[in-house]
Amino acid sequence: MPAPSAPKIYLIDRPGSVQTVLQLGNLGIERADPDYFALLLMDKVVGNDPAARLFKNLREAKGYTYGAYSSFSSSKFRGTFQASSEVRTAVTDGAIKEFMFELKRIREERVTTEELENAKRSLVGSFALSLERPATLLQNIITQKLYNLPADYWDTYPQKVAAITAADVQRAAQKYVDLAHLQIVAVGDASQIRDVLAKYGTVEVFDSEGKLVKGNGKEKFMTRPDFTGTWKFNSAKSVLQIPSPESSIFVIEHSEPKFSLERTHVFGGKSNTFSVALTTNGKLTAVNLGGFESQSKLYWEGDSLVFDSRFVHEGEPASNIVRYRLEGAGQTLIAEEQLRSAQHKHDNRWVFDKQNP
């Protein structure tokens, strides 16, 4: 068995993702290992139950997720111990901090008598109910033969659970929750979470096909386009399926992940202005689109920034999706717009020239 590696994070980039999927873990034990029952109780207290610490912390106390759990596997070879959850992108940092808090806590503090007894009752009760299923009885026999377990293994299962102490649980945690060699797999928007993950180890970034991103992704995610500037509508280069405004000015302030836009259109000599401020984390936000109340979100799609709005128009659901990108050495702003409703279907290509001071 090779020596455990230093902490490492394997990050699968999913641009524009509104969630981060997290799995944190280590190598565990073989099925016949004497530590099996100590690890079983430790896992039950930490996260293998809605009444466990991870669920109570990340869901009930923090509201980061719908669920956070732990589990462990074992066979003839060493399995794994892992903790996992799916959290909103914006709370990735907080979620990992709480995972680390709970994993460190189970190593450093003995579980309370109440926690330990509740975990024991849950395990023994579940075991008793499982014996009512013929398939479970057959699987127990297979498990006993496959791993060469004692003949009375299942007969004495409740006693083995009951014999575990708080000291046994802490010893198992210190042995198998190895924070010095923790491995983390994360799936999410690398531009939003890479720096957060780098606090916990070396980050390797992969694309959705499992290919390693050149330079571990650092260069890629440090070079997001900056849309800051004053942009003037170029009617000659634009292609619109709606009446063209007499003039249009965009004023954008962009400091990743914060993005604000003030748009002023002039139609028939009348000026219409609206402004919006969002972050590029893909989180839905209430936005007034010049008279329309919408639920809007902003997120990266490669080097394009996508503004996705949903609203009601003439009593029918409608959507407006605009993809912003820069061309011409950052001097031209392209806005590809798709407007959809029951009555309308417009595809517009807006072109804006940067107004340099």
Image (cartoon, grey):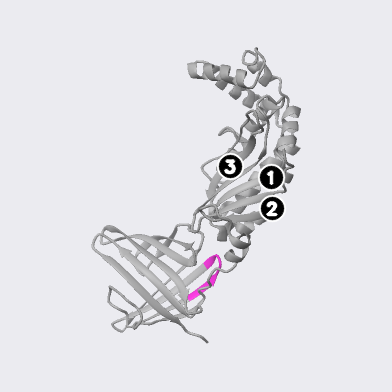
Whole-angstrom CA distance, mark 1 to mark 2, is: 9 Å
Q: What residue is rendered at 28% in x and 73% in y?
A: 241
Is residue 195 a member of the stretch shown in magenta? no
Q: Residue at the far left: name it.
A: 343
The spot of residue 54 in percent (x, y) is 61, 39
Circles 1, 2 touching at the beta carbon (< 8 Å):
yes
Q: Which residues are magenta?
A: 252-258
Badge 1 amino acid: Leu
Q: Within 10 angstroms of label 1, few (less than 14), some, or many (20 or more) residues? A: many
Residue on which disc 3 sits: 84
Task: Give residue 112's mark.
Answer: none
Q: Earlier in the sequence, mark 1 or mark 3?
A: 3
Image check: 94 left or right of 281?
right
Looking at the magenta stretch, what is its main secondary structure?
strand
Residue on which disc 1 sits: 182
**Dot in front, 1 or 3:** 1
